[in-house]
Amino acid sequence: MIYSVDTILSLVLLSILFSLGSSRLTVLFKVIAFQGVVVSIVPLIIGGREFGWGDITFTLATMTVRGIVIPFCIYFAIKKATIETKFRPIVGYNASMMGGLIFIVMAAVVGGKLHLPAVSEGKLLFPAAVTLLVAGMFLLMARRNAIAMVLGYIMMENGIYLVGTTFSVQARHIVEFGILLDILAGVMIMAVILQNIKQAFDDMDTARLRTLKE
Amino acid sequence: MVVEMVFLAPFLTGLIAFFLPRTLGRPLLPLTGVFHLMLSVMLWVKRPSPLFPGYFEVTPEGLLSLIVISLLFFLVSIYAMGYLRESTIRSENIFNGSMLLFLSTMTMVTLSDHIMVMWIAIEATTLSSAPLIFTYRSKASLEATWKYVLVCSVGIAMALLGSVLITIAMDIGKVNVPVSFSALTLNARQLDPLWLKAAFVFILVGYGTKMGLCPMHTWLPDAHSEAPSPASALLSGVLLNCAYLGIFKTNKIMVAAGLGDFSGTILMVFGLMSIIAAATFILKQTEYKRMLAYSSIENMGIIAFGTGIGGPGVYGALLCLIHHSLIKSSLFLTSGNILLGYGTRLIESTGSLARRMPKTFVAFFGGFAAISGFPPFGIFIGELFIILGAFKSGHYSAAGIFIFSMCVVFAGFAKQVMIISFDDKSSRDKILEKQDMIWPQYTLLLTSVFLCFWMPDTLYRTIVEAVTSIGGGF
């Protein structure tokens, strides 16, 4: 049986592949915003849970922060000209995409064998969450562009959020909100640092940040 | 009195400090320091219940960390007054505000009981201390800040994942209690062991990044050397303890669940790796602040190793934790004097410290002797207990590596300290030393000596309480 959640999550999986294979940062921004919106909604629409006004408000707030505020925060911190430049990766785009595809298949196989109590529906929940997490980490390591690294971090956080809200029934809004606030503040500080890197080095290539290396 | 007041007070003054000019903002640091110290002592004596139980709790290990943070911040803030006067820092209000927010978030770590609140607090320490590292606005400090924020945020994200895995372990074990360390420790046996193990590994990697355990330590030497000395003292002296607290509390759950051997072994491996890494890098250091940073990595390794060993090792680890904070912060403050006096961080450009800055030299050399584990300083007793614990539990080869690495660290450290202190350079002029930038270091070192000879009964009992909670003791 196909659930509606799986339809959206398959789009998320596609978007991950897209972000791994793209050389343009603008694409990455759009993908991050899309994923931010989806991971905020998914907990609300997976069935069997009653939700009240509190949940809806919380979902809307999360969606605004993850889907709009966080990506735009980085976007506006850097001048547009910098964003539109293509960047040289450490691992090639085709190889990244291929690796991503293999990973999704593996995650789906492993996910089928784990019997998580909270995941009774939505076969793609586990693969999507884990792939988001790992693809984010991959972007952090395999891209030399500082902006791409920050976006990788955000993708990773989105993955963790999906794991946390869908696999476990323990989530409390007040605590979740604290976490969201921390991540938002973290991204803002990263945006300020990106701005300073741009000013000081006139480039976003992290290969230039090597003076302290031993 | 409510528990939450202890971290809310510096939070408020921190926010105010952002908007105050330097003449008003500067004295706010020691004033808040005194107030915070008073609150912490009251908390220690009265042990009140929190306003939000389940989220916050007064625990013995938390109290130990809190009192160290409070004492250290007070002394560092007095030093900072002098330091700010002598050095040129642009936008001092950001420095003052961040210092106070940093104090607030670290206090929150020591008092938090809810797993996610702990995470929020530890991530908040990263965010509030990032501006401190960027104080000098140089390219190197920018790079250090970038590394610090990115590596620590990603690392701590791992800890968040670990915390989420704990909730999954609760779901599978059908445990329906608040997601707090204290409640989970009581119900640890019902948690699903497999998921709990996975959670511990992620939490150890996450908070271990922040604690500076090898191989996640890459940010630490950069951040500690680029930050202004009062901030370095706090980063090294107490921030690392806060991250350790997260690991300690998770380990408490592991021990209660009967998985103490599993967690202990991992802690020992990470601990030994850190000590070996520090020993390797300390030998070729050219900057004295980086050398101190590597010594912090070594000491965090020692503490993780001692915690993993169990038995008397845990007692030794907690002693090392307290004394490392006192001694290392004193050393970092002293390094601030050297930096202001010589105007360089390079070891080869210093020299004749004993002649040119005699008072600073006493603090520096005393700190060196203390951190190397010489009696009568506390690290000596701590390390002795850890080695005893290792022998008692039959980890002879681990103890061998431990002792050998410490000898290497001592050799590397001693070589550099000799150059700084006695190397004869052309200039022999005295450098002016301010009183208020000397006695905080002396106080810290004397406290360490004092605690070695006479430990207050309440302190001893609190340490033993914390030690027995993770299955340690004699």
Image: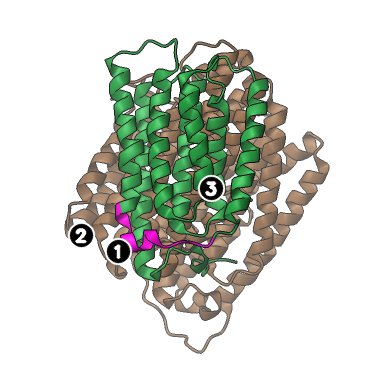
Q: Residues within 10 Å of mark 3 (few under 14, many from 20)?
A: many
Asked if the residues shown at circle 3 and circle 1 are in contact, with their CB atoms under 8 angstroms apart, the answer is no
B460 horizontally vs A191: left or right: right
Residue that appears at 31% across and 40% down: A68
Residue that appears at 32% across and 45% down: B101
Q: Is residue A59 above or below residue B296?
A: above
Disc 2 is attached to a residue of which chain? B
Residue that appears at 33% across and 32% down: A63
Q: What is chain B's hue in the picture?
A: brown
Marks 2 and 1 sit apart, C-alpha to C-alpha, by: 9 Å
Q: Which mark is residue B276?
A: none
Q: Which mark is residue B22?
A: 2
Q: Residues within 10 Å of mark 2 (few under 14, many from 20)?
A: some
Q: Is residue B235 above or below residue B225?
A: above
Helix or strand or loop: what does disc 2 sit on?
helix
Disc 3 is attached to a residue of which chain? A
Q: Which mark is residue B84?
A: 1
Helix or strand or loop: what does disc 1 sit on?
helix
Foreground of the two, A10 or B23: A10
Residue B32 in percent (x, y) is at 27, 45
Q: Which residues are magenta?
A: A76-88
User: Which residue matches tag 3?
Assistant: A20
Q: What is chain A's hue in the picture?
A: green
Residue B409 position by quadrant: bottom right
